[in-house]
Amino acid sequence: MDKRKKRIILIGRSSAGKTTLCQYISNEALRYHKTQTVEVVNKTMIDTPGEYLERNNYRGALQVSSIDADVIVLVQDSTEDGSMFPPAYASSFAKPVIGVVTKSDLADERQIERSIIYLKNAGATDIFITSSVEGSGFEGLLKYLNYD
Ligand SMILES: Nc1nc2c(ncn2[C@@H]2O[C@H](COP(=O)(O)OP(=O)(O)O)[C@@H](O)[C@H]2O)c(=O)[nH]1
Ligand SMILES: [Mg+2]
């Protein structure tokens, strides 16, 4: 089995929590692997600007940016009323697509459920509910990405 750390690209609208998620994962990966340098950890993550998703004529840039990634991570803010991800968006990438719900510390059960539905409709196969503030929900995600 391939236990290499998966390289990911984070896609989601502005303020969804992509950069915070990246930082949180970096810190956790560092904690688990004390010998790893920050550079190696960061090389496994591609953060993207929300504008790439929000502006139709920029979407191609996400496809190009995703070439070096093993896994596409769709980032959905649990407090957002609606989603930027079109139905079956995942099928435009010839790669595994997972979903991460962010800011669960700010959301109620209904908002979390709604976020899961958005991500499922977009075609995410695995969905992780996280809070970068509380540091919750990362165990499964880090395991999936072989960062544990
Ligand atoms: N309460 C809470 N705030 C968060 C969380 N993740 C991100 N934020 C806040 O959301 C805002 C946008 O986050 P950022 O990572 O810059 O979003 P990006 O535009 O997707 O990169 C910042 O003010 C973060 O502090 C979270 O899990 N909980
Ligand atoms: Mg950002």
Image: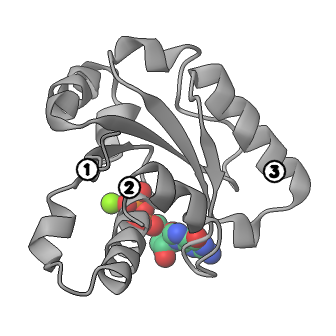
Element type where label 2 sits in the image: loop
Element assignment for label 1: loop
Residue 31 pos. (x, y %): 36, 85
Q: Residues within 10 Å of mark 1 (few under 14, many from 20)?
A: few
Q: Amino acid at mark 3?
A: Gln
Question: Which residue is depicted at the point 26% across and 87% down?
Answer: 34
Identity of the amino acid at label 1?
Arg
**Dot 3 corresponds to which residue?**
111
User: Residue 130's x, y, as percent?
Assistant: 62, 63
What whole-number distance in Å separates the C-alpha atoms at marks 3 and 2? 29 Å
Q: Residue furthest front?
A: 1
Write down which quadrant ligand 2 falls in.
bottom left
Q: Is residue 31 above or below residue 103?
A: below
Mark 2 belongs to which amino acid? Asn
Residue at 46 percent of width and 61 percent of height: 142
The correct choice, above or below, for 22 with respect to 109 in the image is below
**Image quadrant for the N terminus?**
top left
Characterize the local packing of mark 3: few (<14), some (14-19) or many (20 or more) Cα atoms within 10 angstroms: some
- Verify CB contact (< 8 Å) between mark 2 and mark 1: yes
Give the camera-side residue of 11 and 27.
Answer: 27
Report x, y in % for residue 42.
19, 65
Kindly indicate whether the residue at mark 2 contacts the one at mark 3 (C-beta within 8 angstroms).
no
| Residue 59 shown left or right of residue 72 in the figure | left
- Residue at numbered disc 1: 4
Q: Which residue is mark 2?
A: 146
Q: Please indicate whether residue 3 sits to the left or right of residue 131 in the image.
A: left
Residue 119 occupies quadrant: top right
Q: Is residue 50 visible?
A: yes
Which of discs 3 and 1 lies nearer the camera? The answer is: 1
Measuring from the top left, give residue 106's x and y in whole percent: 74, 70
